[in-house]
Image (cartoon, grey):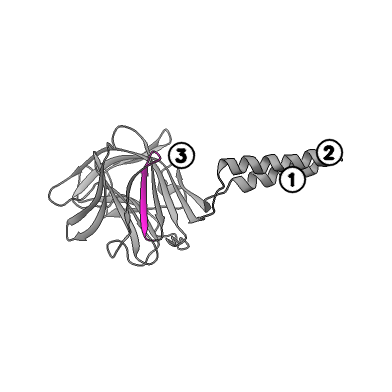
Amino acid sequence: MKFGKICAVLGVLFCTTSLYATSYTLYDGSLGGTPDQQGYLDLLAYPQGSPDYHGETGGVTTFSTHSNTLFGFAYDTWSWNTLSLDRNKGYSLSINMKINSETHYEPYNQAGFSIALSSGDSYGVWVAFWNNEIWVIDGVSGNNFTKGNSFEFNTTTGFVDYDIFINDDSYDIHANGASILTGALRTGILFGDLNYIAIGDLANLASVDASIASIILNDDYQTVPIPEPASCVLLIAGLFGLVRRKIKK
């Protein structure tokens, strides 16, 4: 009987694998409170002041900066001294959120909500969210943001699971499990050589009302091959065949 259990465990282990070595729940709205109250994220506000609204209700944090477009408000990892975002190993950020409304002004191409991920070697990606479009910021010159890859997507219809995968020199952005944007990481437009995450209103000529339910960081991507399903079936069948022979003996 013990031999059978060992074979079963070996079969399952061979046919499954974990892609990430470490997972950090940066925010879980079901626990109550706002992201800055759960240990990993700080509040980033500039200039000093307060947003129109910032609070948690029903497991969701909502904030708004619409009354003053010059006011920025976000969550970041400034105090997380041990954070290491190694793009060579790979990492991802997953966020469940909804843009309730976003406002920006032409011709600046800024965005009231964005997510910035910066590896420790200055390479990263800065993803912007409008009401009807998601796009990547390729550069910044004064108040002008250079618009890179973009994808038309309604960010206001409901909560969406967004995933930003970073691996080597590239990014892959998903919405509800589907890849929508891919490209090369940028350098020199983010936060120098910091390992850094910022989420929220990072603009001075745009504003947003947004709701966030969860944020998860997956660190240290493991490129372990997963056997095809048919191979797994053959392996497990073979192992149980050994069990039967063992029992007959």
Bounds of the magenta segment: 169-178
Q: Position of residue 48 (x, y in %)?
A: 27, 54
5 sits left or right of 50 in the view: right
Q: Earlier in the sequence, mark 3 or mark 2?
A: 3
Question: Is residue 170 rendered to the left or right of residue 240?
Answer: left
The mark lying in front, picked from 1 and 3, is 1
Marks 1, 2: nearer the viewer: 2
Mark-to-mark CA distance, 1 and 3: 42 Å
Please say if 191 is above or below 102. Answer: below
In the image shown, does 136 or 226 lie closer to the viewer? 226
Residue type at mark 3?
Gly
What is the x, y in percent for residue 97? 36, 40
Distance Cα–Cα, label 1 vs label 2? 14 Å
> Quick one: SS at disc 3?
loop
Element marked by disc 1: helix
In this view, the residue in front, 35 or 12, is: 12
Q: Is residue 172 magenta?
A: yes
Q: Earlier in the sequence, mark 1 or mark 2?
A: 1
Q: Which residue is mark 1?
A: 6
Quarter of the view holding residue 125: bottom left
Which residue is labeled 2 in the image? Answer: 247
Task: Determine whether label 1 and label 3 are within 8 Å by CB.
Answer: no
Rendered view: 233 above or below 218: above
Q: Residue at x 12, y 50 (%)?
A: 107
Of the residues tagged 3 and 2, which is closer to the observer?
A: 2
Residue labelled with disc 3? 32
- Residue 248 position, x and y percent, is 85, 37
Q: What SS does tag 2 mark?
A: helix
Cα distance in 3D space between marks 3 and 2 = 53 Å
